[in-house]
Amino acid sequence: MNEATTLSRKADFPGLVTSEGKPWHYLDTAATAQKPQAVIDAMSNALGRDYATVHRGVYSRSANMTLAYEAARRRVADFIGAKGENEIVFVRGATEGINLVAQSWGGLNLKAGDRIMLSQLEHHSNIVPWQMIAQQTGAEIDVCPLTEDHLIDLDALEQMLTPKHKIVALAHVSNVLGSILGVKRAAKLAHSVGAKFLLDGCQAAPRMRLNMAELDCDFYVLSAHKLYGPTGIGVLWAREHLLEEMPPYQGGGAMIDTVSFAKTTYAPPPQRFEAGTPMITEAIALHAAIDYVDAMDMESLFAHESALAITLRDELRKINSIRLFGPEKTAGIVSFEMEGVHPHDLGTILDEENVAIRAGHHCAQPLMIYLGVPATARASFGLYSDESDIDALLRGIERTKRIFG
Ligand code: PMP
């Protein structure tokens, strides 16, 4: 991908300039992606000239909104290679998607003595919901370790899995290290002991072409705001037969078939899992975000971000006070530590240079313990990132070195 391509992409994102009109070197896309103008426009129209509720109104604008909301569901299904839109549940984000599966599927299927398999690098949102359902059911959690180069260790997974494991829930791509899971083997291992397989696709969805059949998982979650869409909406994909057997996660309007004080019956999925007025404008903006991303070649997007990560790693390796984490080949995410400089101090100095990185535990405290650090500095790339962002980061690091002597 040449510089002209990324420059023209940067121009699509009004968030990539400072209030003084200078370039803002945004290296925190793993936390949340900047939005292209097309998404901002879609959201603004949905909140303005097109705004009305869905699924209820008899007037034409509401009927049109319902069509647009359901079109967004079909677009998501198409984008992730689902069999159909009935497999797509709109949730608030990946966090809610995992909580939904843990409470609804887990509540139905887990009992004392059962085991849940996670890994050492999971985000808190793929740990805490499982701890909560484990406490409620008496199931227990196992933690798959990492290899020396910080990938989920599938040999260890093979050794550890038993028929007591009812679910294996793993990050498709680590938000801290960029490590990419060997999905096919992980799915095979999970299924070989009869466990269901959940993938946390928050970091993979914006970077890799997804196909649910090929991934061979049972549940997949993602957040729209990492996919260049708005906050407040995400997707839970699940095999239709699983959604059909799962009880509702929340009760309220829109998720019912009939209600009386004697008995309430529920709507079929996905409506059964969408209680209340849904995220109408967010769904429409997510549709626009998918259109934007899908117009590009996902393979070259992946290659672009992955190559930037390798360039950055090579440059950081030349600075002897820096320790790198994670594998060489990542999905565009680089975590590191600078000797004698707390990541927060580094982040603050970089901010003065109009460079935004993330410093902290990245909602992965068990991983920080494993790495033996309280926090890391993390640079994460997006489709708009280019070498100018790396140069600005390196200049900021040099200045930090001078300040800290
Ligand atoms: N999993 C991973 C790997 C993530 O990166 C994130 C967001 N940092 C989440 C889950 C949670 O996503 P959200 O906060 O959008 O629900």
Image (cartoon, rainbow, N blue to C red):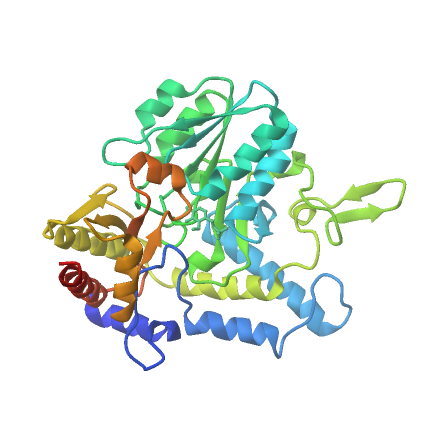
Image quadrant in which you'd find residue 20: bottom left
Q: Position of residue 230 (x, y in %)?
A: 50, 63
Give the vertical position of 368 relative to 108 (above or below): below
Q: Residue at x 58, y 34 (%)?
A: 132
Quarter of the image that includes the N terminus: bottom left
Front one among 83 and 381: 381
> Viewed as shown, does residue 48 lie left or right of 171?
right
Front one among 152 and 371: 371
Q: Residue at x 50, y 75 (%)?
A: 41
Give the vertical position of 332 relative to 39 (above or below): above
Q: Residue at x 32, y 58 (%)?
A: 297
Quarter of the image that includes the C terminus: bottom left
Q: Position of residue 356 (x, y in %)?
A: 31, 64
Q: Residue at x 26, y 46 (%)?
A: 330
> Viewed as shown, does residue 174 lie left or right of 291?
left
Image quadrant in which you'd find residue 74: bottom right
Front one among 253 and 61: 253
Q: Position of residue 193 (x, y in %)?
A: 47, 20
> Viewed as shown, does residue 98 lie left or right of 305?
right
Q: Position of residue 238 (x, y in %)?
A: 55, 41
Residue 378 visible somewhere in the drawing: no
Give the vertical position of 51 relative to 160 (above or below): below
> Viewed as shown, does residue 337 lie left or right of 215?
left
Among all residues in the image, which is located at the extreme bottom?
A: 20
